[in-house]
Image (cartoon, helix red, strand yellow):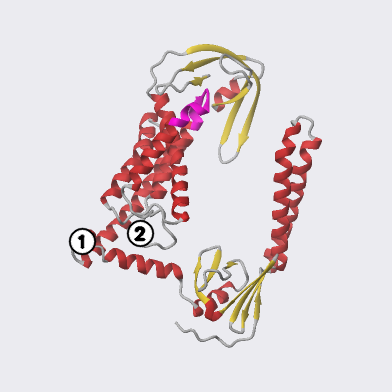
Amino acid sequence: MSNTTQTRPSKEYRLSAAWRIFLSVVCVLMLGGSIFICVLPFIDETMQPSAAYFLVPVGIGFAVFMLYALLESVKGKVILGQGRIIQIEALGKKELLAEDIKGYTADDTYIRVFPKDPKGPKLKISQYIADNQEILQWVAFHGPNLDLVTFQEEEKQLLSDQTLGLTEQEREATLTQARKVAFWLNGIGYAIMAWLVFYPEPYRWAVLAGAVYPLVLTLVSFKYKGIFRLNTKNNSAHPSITPGLLAAGIGIALRALMDVELLRFADILPWVAGVAAFTFAFLLSTTNEFKYTKLKDATIAALIFLLLSFYGYGVSVEANFLLDNSAPQEFEAQVTDKHISNGKTTTYYLTLAPWGPRKEAEDITVTEEYYEQIPAGETIPVLLYSGALDVPYLVVE
């Protein structure tokens, strides 16, 4: 690595013409959509007047973002040469001298250049710029790959940890084994999520797998205490089982959302918080990565707790449903409307008029077969169960 500045004429780099045209067309179309969102509450008579308080700010915000993106695609460029790198942006300019570069990181989307001075400008350069490899080579000449530096430092620290083995060879073998274990456990987590979402049969076994697997991962993390991390940066030397844990948790949460219609969502929240808090505390006992001396640690920990709430929801709702032995109360409700929501999955809704404890019309999710059988205007039976956790839920099929 040399700190010598390359002597070369200045050269400009910008998005290719094809990309600029494509982004310009997309931005203009999305800008039109933003304007439509703003005026929709005033031209759609079926909307409540209060909808304008939400849609107009959203439309304006989206329009401002699209205008910025359009200006960035036209004006944005990077200039290299004369011992400096300059990034021209839609609303300004950033500049770093070669000798002020601490290092860089690169992924499939961006090249990020960091200054030695924490208060200096940080550059975030799109990898879609034409001849982006020349930019990467220039930056690499003037500073190290910080991801690689972090990996080497973390690996050195791990290989010096005598709790992982008496000799460096033993510690290296333990680390290699932990990485292999993490790879397979994350894969199993994704498989459980797919099982729960696409074909949850046998049902109880699928739900049990989603409920137990995050706890199994926590026990594995305890076995490899000090190696696994909940939050890993790019190219970290520490393996992570967080992807598998979250996949299983999200899978059981989606299954609960699709299968169980709660009478009141708020009733399940104490159970959700309790399950998430227990799992979170259990996980934290297996790692010492959060010191809470920085706001960043607390923020990441809060985010992980929030993600574990999906798991808490799925486990609580499914336990309330599958362990329930209560006799149902029978009601009747009229179907006033029906509609389908299309996205990554298709969801079928029936709108029920007020019935029993529900004093307002509300949507419920049903299967495609039941949706096709029930016309609008028909009265259907509704069974209300108390739930194993005293969280009432209803069944219409």
Q: Which residue is drawn at 72% across and 41% down?
A: 55
Q: Considering only vertical position in the picture, is 63 above or below 383?
A: below
Q: Residue at x 35, y 65 (%)?
A: 154
Percent of width and height locating residue 74: 72, 66
Amino acid type at image mark 2? His
Q: Can residue 386 be seen in this view?
A: yes
Q: Among all residues in the image, which is located at the extreme left?
A: 166
Find residue 155 and report its image quarter. Answer: bottom left
The residue indicated by pointer 2 is 238
Q: Give the range drawn in magenta.
A: 257-270
Between 193 and 281, the residue placed more toward the observer is 281
Q: Considering only vertical position in the picture, is 366 above or below 125?
A: above
Does 269 lie within the magenta span?
yes
Secondary structure state at the residue bearing disc 2? loop
Instruction: Residue 165: give its label.
Output: 1
Does 168 lie within the magenta span?
no
Cβ–Cβ under 8 Å for marks 2 and 1: no
Does residue 226 appear left or right of residue 131 in this picture? left
Does residue 87 appear left or right of residue 306 in this picture? right
State the quadrant of the N terminus: bottom left
Secondary structure state at the residue bearing disc 1? loop
Query: Looking at the image, is mark 2 or mark 1 earlier in the sequence?
Result: 1
Q: Among all residues in the image, which is located at the extreme bottom?
A: 7
Percent of width and height locating residue 209: 35, 37
